[in-house]
């Protein structure tokens, strides 16, 4: 009974193992196939950086340790590199790594941040700093048993590794059903290190010369038994490892990079040839091209632009062009420029960039003003004004090399020019003559160089036209009245301009004379010429005059009649004498 149970249990166990084997082999092959589809490819490997190729729609990360945990650190936008022609992201840079250290990289679909989604992973090792012995690859001879691997590092360990591999090969009956894990373990060479080649992309899978030979052998030779191959290797002392034909390497890319001409040396940093408010022109470099860092590039403001490393510049977006003139720029703005030699991407490696330099566009003249006098303004004669000239950039109290500003130089009224200013570039003046005027102020551009402002000779002008009109005249009224028995001239409401004089004359009738004169209600004394004058009239006034009868002739007093009688007597006598003389003369003629 016990024997039956044991047999039944053994049969059941064998059945389970067979079923497991049936499903395990396809699963392993499927896993291998998926790994081949989703593996991560390296573009280049150095001692401190690894650059991966980027597939569309994927993002990449490196596995790091944070405290005691192992986490994924996903690459930032500035780590991705765009192709200059297609503008698509083709590479991602992981820098600042340790030399001769293995790192785990992962990728996943973009926007797939679910925690349960495990990224596809791949391991790569940075190059060692110390030089190591290279393993040369030589084309295989016609005979299959010829060894091509240089035997400089063949040791007893290599012999042991060969023996161990032979034993594993003999025991295997179905080599095609190897799992991906077994293949990976077999492809690791014993006591063989990758050669240091900084200027070439590092392969994703390292191979010995014998592996390369095996991949190039015809299918008919691959069908030979592994035991025969191992026996031949034991005789020649060659170490050989097995690699599936489908294993993907970057050997082809390595061969292509070897055929390209070396990169041209970096030229000197580009010099400034000229600049305006909206353009910067660099000095011409023979067979060179010129680049400007785009505005959205991030530069550490705490460091000088010249101090930026080539790696830092390589991660920035740079617009390259053949012309040394960059137009359409923003005024008074700093821009970063680099240069390199022209190259053919198909036959030559990318040229090295020069050191970066920063140049600033000029400050525009717009913004320079003349205040205190309105454009096309109208002012009355006698108005006092103070014009002030303000140049654009005059408020820059902490200038740096490359800054610019506009400074007032001279001013004029359209005739003679003046260069004398009051404090703060002011011009005080009084408007007198009526007419049209034009105030012109000349500004000169200055540039800050070597710690001082220097004139450039470039001049621009602000013109302010205006006019002066006659001031309105102020008129005052003097009310003049006269009483009976006389007149006043002028009389009535008399108007007088401000500051002028006016005189009044009094004319009494016969038998009358001026009695009294009142000015603004108060009696005043007048001269014998019957006149009164107001001097420099600046207000309204009143004037009035009255007249009175002149003094009468008195009658003769007692005792004065005798004088009249004598006069009459003399008159009568005179008349008689006259008559007598006339009669005498007539009678004398008759005789």
Image (tube, rainbow, N blue to C red):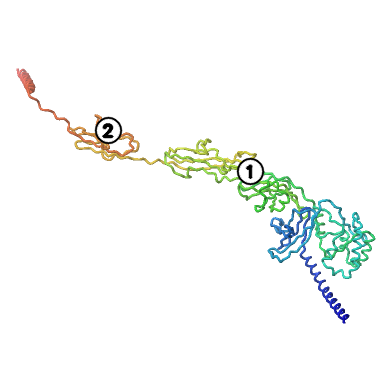
Q: Position of residue 480 (x, y in %)?
A: 26, 38
Which of the numbered marks, if any, corresponds to residue 402? 1
Residue with the mark numbered 2: 532
Which percent across, then down, holds residue 504?
27, 34
Q: Which of 13 and 338 lies nearest the eye of the viewer? A: 13
Check disc 2 and report its element: helix, strand or loop.
strand
Residue under the image location 54 percent in, 44 percent down: 368
**Near-viewer residue (68 or 435):** 68
Q: Looking at the image, do the residues carrying marks 1 and 2 touch, with CB atoms under 8 Å apart? A: no
Dot label at residue 559:
none
SS type, badge 1: loop
In this rendering, the answer to whether 561 lies above or below 379 is: above
The one nearer the camera, 174 or 333, is: 174
Quarter of the C terminus within the rendering: top left
Residue 253 visible to the viewer: yes
- For residue 180, side relative to residue 337 (left or right): right
């Amino acid at each position: 009974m016990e024997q039956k149970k044991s047999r039944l249990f053994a049969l059941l166990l064998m059945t389970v193992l067979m079923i497991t084997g049936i499903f395990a082999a396809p699963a392993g092959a499927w896993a291998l196939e998926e790994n081949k589809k989703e593996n991560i490819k390296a573009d280049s490997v150095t001692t401190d950086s690894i650059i991966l190729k980027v597939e569309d729609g994927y993002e990449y990360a490196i596995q790091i340790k944070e405290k005691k945990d192992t986490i994924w650190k996903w690459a930032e936008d500035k780590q991705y590199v765009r192709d200059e022609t297609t503008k698509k992201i083709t590479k991602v840079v992981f820098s600042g790594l340790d030399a001769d250290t293995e790192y785990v990289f992962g990728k996943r679909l973009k926007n797939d941040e679910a925690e349960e989604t495990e990224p596809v992973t791949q391991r790569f090792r940075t190059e060692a700093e110390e030089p190591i012995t290279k393993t040369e690859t030589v084309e295989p001879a016609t005979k299959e048993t010829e060894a091509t691997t240089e035997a400089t590092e063949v040791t007893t360990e290599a012999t042991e590794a060969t023996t161990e591999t032979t034993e594993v090969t003999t025991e295997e009956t179905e080599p095609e059903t190897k799992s991906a894990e077994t293949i990976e373990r077999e492809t690791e060479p014993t006591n063989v290190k990758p050669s240091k080649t900084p200027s070439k992309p590092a392969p994703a899978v390292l191979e010995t010369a014998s592996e390369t030979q095996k991949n190039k052998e015809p299918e008919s030779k691959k069908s030979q038994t592994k035991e025969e191959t191992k026996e031949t290797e034991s005789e020649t002392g060659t170490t050989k490892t097995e690699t599936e034909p489908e294993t993907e390497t970057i050997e082809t890319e390595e061969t292509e990079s070897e055929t390209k001409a070396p990169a041209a040396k970096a030229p000197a940093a580009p010099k400034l040839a000229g600049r305006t408010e909206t353009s910067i022109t660099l000095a011409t470099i023979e067979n060179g091209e010129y680049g400007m860092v785009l505005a959205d590039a991030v530069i550490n403001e705490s460091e000088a632009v010249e101090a930026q490393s080539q790696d830092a510049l390589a991660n920035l977006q740079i617009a390259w062009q053949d012309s040394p003139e960059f137009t359409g720029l923003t005024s008074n703005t700093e821009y970063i420029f680099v240069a390199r030699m022209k190259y053919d991407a198909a036959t030559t490696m990318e040229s090295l960039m020069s050191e970066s330099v920063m140049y600033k566009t000029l400050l525009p003249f717009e913004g320079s003003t003349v205040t205190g006098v309105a454009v096309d303004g109208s002012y009355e004669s006698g108005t006092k004004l103070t014009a002030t000239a303000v140049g654009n950039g005059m408020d820059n109290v902490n200038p740096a090399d490359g800054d610019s500003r506009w400074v007032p130089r001279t001013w004029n009224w359209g005739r003679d020019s003046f260069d004398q200013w009051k404090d703060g570039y002011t011009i005080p003046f009084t408007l007198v003559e009526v007419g049209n005027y034009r105030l012109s102020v000349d500004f000169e551009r200055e540039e800050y160089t070597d710690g001082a402002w220097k004139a450039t000779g470039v001049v621009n002008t602000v013109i302010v036209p205006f006019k002066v009109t006659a001031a309105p005249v102020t008129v005052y009224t003097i009310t003049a009245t006269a009483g009976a028995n006389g007149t006043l001239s002028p009389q009535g409401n008399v108007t007088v301009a401000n500051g002028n004089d006016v005189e009044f004359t009094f004319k009494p009738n016969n038998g009358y004379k001026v009695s009294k004169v009142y000015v603004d209600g108060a009696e005043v004394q007048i001269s014998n010429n019957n006149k009164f004058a107001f001097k420099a009239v600046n207000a309204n006034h009143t004037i009035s005059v009255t007249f009175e009868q002149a003094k009468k002739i008195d009658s003769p007093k007692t005792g004065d009649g005798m004088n009249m009688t004598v006069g009459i007597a003399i008159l009568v006598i005179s008349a008689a004498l006259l008559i007598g003389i006339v009669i005498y003369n007539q009678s004398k003629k008759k005789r």
